[in-house]
Amino acid sequence: MDSKIISPAVIGRLPRYYRYLGDLKDEGVERISSQELSELMKVTASQIRQDFNNFGGFGQQGYGYNVEYLYNEIGKLLGLHENHHLIIIGAGNLGRALTNYSNFENRGFIFEGIFDQNPALIGKKIGELTVMPMEEIESFILAHSIDIVVIAIPKTGAVAVADRVVNCGIKAIWNFAHTDLNVPDGVVVENVHLSDSLMKLSYTLSTKNNSVD
Amino acid sequence: MDSKIISPAVIGRLPRYYRYLGDLKDEGVERISSQELSELMKVTASQIRQDFNNFGGFGQQGYGYNVEYLYNEIGKLLGLHENHHLIIIGAGNLGRALTNYSNFENRGFIFEGIFDQNPALIGKKIGELTVMPMEEIESFILAHSIDIVVIAIPKTGAVAVADRVVNCGIKAIWNFAHTDLNVPDGVVVENVHLSDSLMKLSYTLSTKNNSVD
DNA sequence: TAGATTGTTAATCGATTAACAATC
DNA sequence: TAGATTGTTAATCGATTAACAATC
C-alpha cells in the first residue's frame, strides 16, 4: 500500500546516484545542488530533480540536497538498509568469482552457500563457503532464509533450477545464464548476459570503423 | 559513409534477437514471421518489424523472415563476422573467470593476453594465457593488434589504465570496474557494473515486500 | 529581504504500438 | 489470383528537458 510505480529508467539510475553520493560523502562534501551534481555525472539537472521527486522531496529550496541524507535515503530505496541472504548455484569460474567478491557483503548482500552438480567439487572450500550438492538447495533455502538466488551455471540447467527455487518461494533471481528464465508474476529476474554486453560493444566498434570516413 | 544512427534501445535488443534466432536455427526452423517470433520472445510484432527495418528489409512480404539469413545478418551487424582480439587487465577472480569463459571465443572474441600488477601472479598460467606485468600492456597491444581491452581491476586503478590504453589507440573498453571511465569521443565504453545490477534486484525485491498488502 | 535552488507543470523529444497499403 | 505478412506511416505513449512559481 506504498508507492506509485517508478519507471525502470529511474530505478536503473539509482545505483549510479548512490555511487556518486557515496564518493561525495567520503570526500566530506555536505551539500550539493542538482546543478553541481549534473556537471559531475554528466546528466541534466532537470533529470536529477525529476528522478528524486519520484520519491518525494529529498531536497530543500535555496539549499540543494544534503549529501549524507540523500545517500542514506537512496540506500533505503535500494533495499540496502537490510541484509540479503544469497546462495550461488554453480561453483564454476563465475560462481567462484562472485563468492570472493567481498564488496557485496559490505552492502548487505551475504553469500550463505554455494552449490554444484559436479561431485568432484562437493566439499571443496571457496572462500568461506563449502560447495554443497544440488539436492540440498531446497532445504538450505528454507533453513537459512535465503531471499536471493544467483544462477551461475550454463543455460542447459538454468531454467530447471530457476523453477526449483521459485517453488521454494524465492522471489528474486540474479541470472548469469545465457537464457531467459520464465518465472511467474511476482518473481523478479535481473539478467547479467555478459555476451550480450560484449556484442553491444562489438556492434558499436564495427559501426564506427565502417562509418568514420 | 554508412548508416543512419540506430537508437541504443534497438542495439540493446539485437543480441537477444541473435540468441533466439540461433536457437531456432539449431532446431532446424527455416522461416518465422514477426508474429511467431513476438510470441516466443514476448515483445510486440510491431517492434520486431520496426527494429529490423532500421537495417533495411530482412524479410519478405507474405513469407516472413528466413531464420538463417536473419541470424547471419544480425551477426554481421554485431560485428561477429570478424575476429576481435582482447586483453584482460586484472588477473583476479573476475579476470580469471572471463579468461576461461571459452564461449566468447566461439563468437570471435579471442583473449590474447592477461595482465596484473601483483608480482606474485606474473608468469602464472590462467587457461592458455600467462599473466604479464602491467608495464607490457602498451607494447602488447601494438604487437598483437588488440582492439578491445577488458578492465577487471578495482576502481582505484581503472581510470589510469583506461587512459593508458586509449593512448595506445584502443577504441573499445569493456569495463567491470565500479567507476565511470572518462574517455574521449570516439572511444566506446561498455560498463558491467555488477553491484548496480544487484542493487536493482534488491530495489524491486524491497518494493514488492512493502507494497504487496 | 534577496538570492538560490528546489518541486512541479508544460513542452519537446523519442520510442513503442497500431494500422494499413505494398507486395511476395 | 487470394492470402499472408512485411515495410512503413500515423497515433500513442512515456521519458526527458525546459521553464518558472513556490519557498527556504
Image (cartoon, coloured by chain):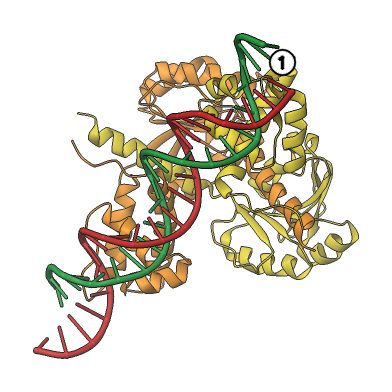
Chain colours: A yellow, B orange, C green, D red
- Amino acid at circle 1: Val
Tell me where residue C16 sits by quadrant.
bottom left
The image shows residue A47, relative to residue A142, as above or below, that is above
Residue at the image position 28 percent from the left and 55 percent from the top: B73
Closer-to-camera residue (B62/A47):
A47
> Taking B9 as reference, is A25 above or below it?
above
The residue singled out by tag 1 in the image is: A29
The answer to whether one can see residue B116 in this image is: no
Left or right side of A79 for B171: left
| A10 left or right, relative to A81 | left
Element on which disc 1 rests: loop
Q: Please provide percent x and percent y for residue A35.
A: 56, 21
Q: Please say if A131 is above or below B38.
A: above
User: Label 1 is found on which chain of the structure?
Assistant: A
Q: Position of residue B209 (x, y in %)?
A: 78, 57
Coordinates of residue B83 in the picture (x, y in percent): 34, 41
Q: Nearer the viewer, residue A34 or B137?
A: A34
Picture quarter with the N terminus of chain A: bottom right
Q: In which quarter of the view is residue B170 placed?
A: top left
Foreground residue among A196 and A2: A2
Relative to residue A3, is residue B63 drawn left or right? left
> Which residue of the protein is positioned furthest toward the right in this rendering?
A143
The residue at 42%/45% (across/down) is A199
Q: Residue at x 72, y 48 (%)?
A: B202
At x 52%, y 14%, the residue is B135
Instruction: Describe residue A31's horizontal placement relative to residue A122 as left or right.
Output: left
